[in-house]
Image (cartoon, rainbow, N blue to C red):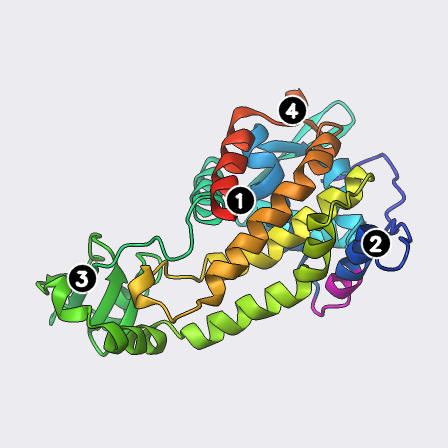
């Protein structure tokens, strides 16, 4: 979508004093900007999920460019990524006079809301202990019916056998197997099985890396340091959400008895919640300078306050 207004999109990284929260944000930005390939589209999804979904669903393209520039994503990358998101049916462009806006499609709003429920609500280890087992129908086209397994929340246990956490409908082409939950809840055996089925070792390594990346900033904020620059606070929060979202959406949400002892996901979620809340006052104040199709965005609409209340319960 062409946008006549020219903006300075060079990343504005304020140089913070060594050991300060500002310097910790600078390091996070530099680490993120140094990744290759830089996934502008994924970061825009994070921006819309965290900032735009609870505030009306649209954002002026200039604000999208501003938020992305602070983490090292150029205007060219933003426009290319946004065009791809439009082409895939997640964003839709609207022009009002000389200004362009990107809004969420109805399908994307539903998708992002479901992701937000996972990200801002579920406490680690609070999932269901029961399981749903499914057997592929003998007459089914294996390739066709297997394609819907992941979207339906199932993982493959073997050829024609799949399992999901909790009680849920089986995908088309599959039949439910009647299994007592008690058959699958034998302490150490259950934990060992879950580690294999969901590759919890890889997920745990991801949580540990997340904590190593964000702990320096989290510790400074816990000591009372605050970011006075609203854009830096928002950037830090978006990077926090971006890093945690990739893990939270892969997490099967197992109940605590099925998880390894001292599960890293629980510690990572608590760090995420504390840091998110500590950044939010300054970040949300800056969000109020953004504009959507309905005008200026609200700093803390009811849905944002509800998210924060849920995270406060996780962090306590």
Which residue position holds label 4?
A: 298
The tag earlier along the polypeptide, 2 or 3, is: 2
Whether residue 76 sits left or right of residue 140 in the image: it is right
- Membership of 316 in magenta stretch: no
State the separation of the CA atoms marked 1 and 3: 28 Å
149 up-or-down from 90: above or below: below
Q: In which quarter of the image is residue 304?
A: top right
Whether residue 45 sits left or right of residue 219 in the image: it is left
Closer mark to the observer between disc 2 and disc 4: 2
> Which segment is the magenta one?
30-37
Which residue position holds label 2?
A: 20
Whether residue 286 sits left or right of residue 207 in the image: it is right
Q: How crowded is mark 1: few (under 14 residues within 10 Å), some or many (20 or more)?
A: many
Which residue position holds label 1?
A: 90
Which residue position holds label 3?
A: 173
State the separation of the CA atoms marked 2 and 3: 56 Å
Circles 3 and 4: CB atoms closer than 8 Å? no
Name the outermost residue toward the front: 223
The tag earlier along the polypeptide, 3 or 4, is: 3
Describe the element under mark 1 as helix, strand or loop: loop
User: Is residue 79 at least partly visible in the picture?
Assistant: no
Disc ID at residue 166: none
The picture places residue 193, in percent across and down from the top left corner, at 28, 77
């Amino acid at each position: 979508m062409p946008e006549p207004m020219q903006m300075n999109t060079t990343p504005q990284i304020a140089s913070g004093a060594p050991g300060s929260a500002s310097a910790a944000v600078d390091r996070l930005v530099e680490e993120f900007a140094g990744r290759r390939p830089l996934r502008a589209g994924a970061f825009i999804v994070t921006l819309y999920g965290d900032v735009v979904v609870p505030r009306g669903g649209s954002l002026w393209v200039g604000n999208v460019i501003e938020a992305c520039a602070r983490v090292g994503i150029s205007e060219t990358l933003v426009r290319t990524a946004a065009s791809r998101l439009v082409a895939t049916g997640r964003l839709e462009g609207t022009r009002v006079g000389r200004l362009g806006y990107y809004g969420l499609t109805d399908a994307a709003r539903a998708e992002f809301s479901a992701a937000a429920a996972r990200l801002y609500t579920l406490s680690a280890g609070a999932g269901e202990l029961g399981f749903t087992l499914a057997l592929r129908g003998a007459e089914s086209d294996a390739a066709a019916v297997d394609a819907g397994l992941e979207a339906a929340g199932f993982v493959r246990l073997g050829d024609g056998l799949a399992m999901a956490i909790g009680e849920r409908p089986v995908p088309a082409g599959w039949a439910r197997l009647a299994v007592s939950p008690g058959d699958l809840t034998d302490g150490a055996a259950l934990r060992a099985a879950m580690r294999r089925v969901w590759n919890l070792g890889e997920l745990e390594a991801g949580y540990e890396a997340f904590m190593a990346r964000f702990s320096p900033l989290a510790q400074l904020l816990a000591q009372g340091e605050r970011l006075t620059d609203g854009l830096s606070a928002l950037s830090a929060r978006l990077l926090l959400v971006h890093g945690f979202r990739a893990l939270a959406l892969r997490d099967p949400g197992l109940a605590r008895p099925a998880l390894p002892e001292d599960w890293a996901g629980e510690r990572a979620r608590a760090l995420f919640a504390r840091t998110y809340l500590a950044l939010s006052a300054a970040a949300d104040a800056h969000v109020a300078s953004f504009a959507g199709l309905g005008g200026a965005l609200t700093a803390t609409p009811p849905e944002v306050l509800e998210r924060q209340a849920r995270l406060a319960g996780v962090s306590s």
